[in-house]
């Protein structure tokens, strides 16, 4: 398959947010409507194939891809947010980071029982965030029908943490 427009635009920023991390900056992709549209279209195709009934975006960059997907597919958009941002009754999942922990939250009424949820983020790294979101969907009795990412850092093997679910990543770095 021809190279995606987004692949040429993703910018490597070394040593951000800390030494040794190569940050994949999607800012130039967002500035290019054709590249963004192409990425959204491909992820939408996958979500349709997986029978998605709602799109879940992971804060913050998962919102940038997830919300336009939901609009395009005429599906509900639901949010997984960082700790302390959601105002209504919520559930949380804590997960390990390289150093320390992080927490994501969802509103308890964000998912209905049996609803097929397609989870979207810009990038799959170690998979901790993605797994925590899948856990919350399961606790709310929803069904994770798949994951969609613009980028997957294959060398971090995050796919192993969510191996029970189908994963579509548009660009993979090994
Ligand atoms: P993880 O839980 O390790 O899979 O981390 C995933 C989250 O961290 C995603 O929301 C990404 O936006 C962000 N992230 C992790 N590593 C990078 C990286 N090298 N470049 C850009 N974003 C990253």
Image (cartoon, helix red, strand yellow):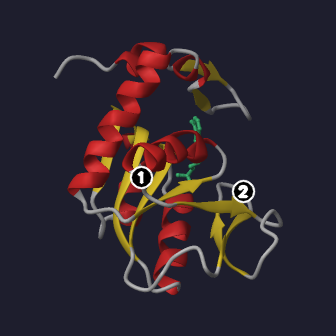
Q: Is residue 135 left or right of residue 95?
A: left
Is the CB–ligand 1 distance for label 2 below 8 Å?
A: no
Please say if 40 is above or below 32.
below
Q: Position of residue 120 (x, y in %)?
A: 47, 51
Does residue 28 show up?
A: yes
Label 2 environment density (alpha carbons within 10 Å; few <14, some 14–19, many ≥20): few
Q: Is residue 117 left or right of residue 106?
A: left
Picture residue at 33% right of the left edge, 35% below the top? 41
Question: Could you tell me which quadrant the C terminus lies in?
Answer: top left
Q: Position of residue 111 (x, y in %)?
A: 51, 76
Quarter of image, ligand 1: top right
Picture residue at 66% right of the left edge, 46% below the top? 60
Q: Position of residue 10 (x, y in %)?
A: 50, 20
Q: Which residue is mark 1?
A: 74
Question: Could you tell me which quadrant the N terminus lies in?
Answer: top left
**Most foreground residue, 58 or 75:** 75
Disc marking residue 99: 2
Q: Position of residue 102 (x, y in %)?
A: 71, 63
**2 vs 1, front mark:** 1
> Callout 1: helix, strand or loop?
loop
Please say if 69 is above or below 25.
below
Picture residue at 72% right of the left edge, 65% below the top? 101
Please say if 59 is above or below 110.
above
**Most foreground residue, 90 or 112:** 112
Measure the alpha-carbon separation of dots 2 and 1: 39 Å
**Most foreground residue, 22 or 83:** 83
**Mark 2 or mark 1: whose residue is earlier in sequence:** 1
> Callout 2: helix, strand or loop?
loop
Label 1 environment density (alpha carbons within 10 Å; few <14, some 14–19, many ≥20): few
Most extreme residue toward the front is: 74
């Amino acid at each position: 398959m021809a190279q995606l427009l987004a692949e040429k635009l993703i910018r490597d920023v070394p040593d951000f947010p800390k030494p040794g991390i190569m940050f994949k900056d999607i800012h130039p992709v967002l500035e290019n409507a054709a590249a963004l549209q192409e990425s959204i279209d491909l992820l939408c195709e996958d979500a349709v194939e997986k029978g998605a009934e709602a799109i879940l975006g992971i804060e913050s960059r998962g919102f940038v891809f997830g919300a336009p997907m939901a609009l395009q597919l005429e599906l509900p958009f639901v949010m997984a947010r960082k700790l302390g941002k959601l105002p209504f009754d919520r559930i949380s999942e804590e997960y390990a980071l390289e150093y320390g922990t992080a927490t994501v939250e969802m509103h308890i009424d964000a998912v209905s029982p049996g609803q097929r949820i397609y989870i979207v983020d810009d990038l799959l790294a170690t998979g901790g965030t993605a797994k925590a979101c899948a856990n919350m969907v399961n606790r709310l009795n929803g069904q994770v029908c798949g994951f969609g990412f613009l980028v997957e850092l294959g060398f971090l093997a995050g796919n192993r943490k969510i191996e029970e679910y189908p994963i579509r990543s548009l660009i993979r770095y090994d």
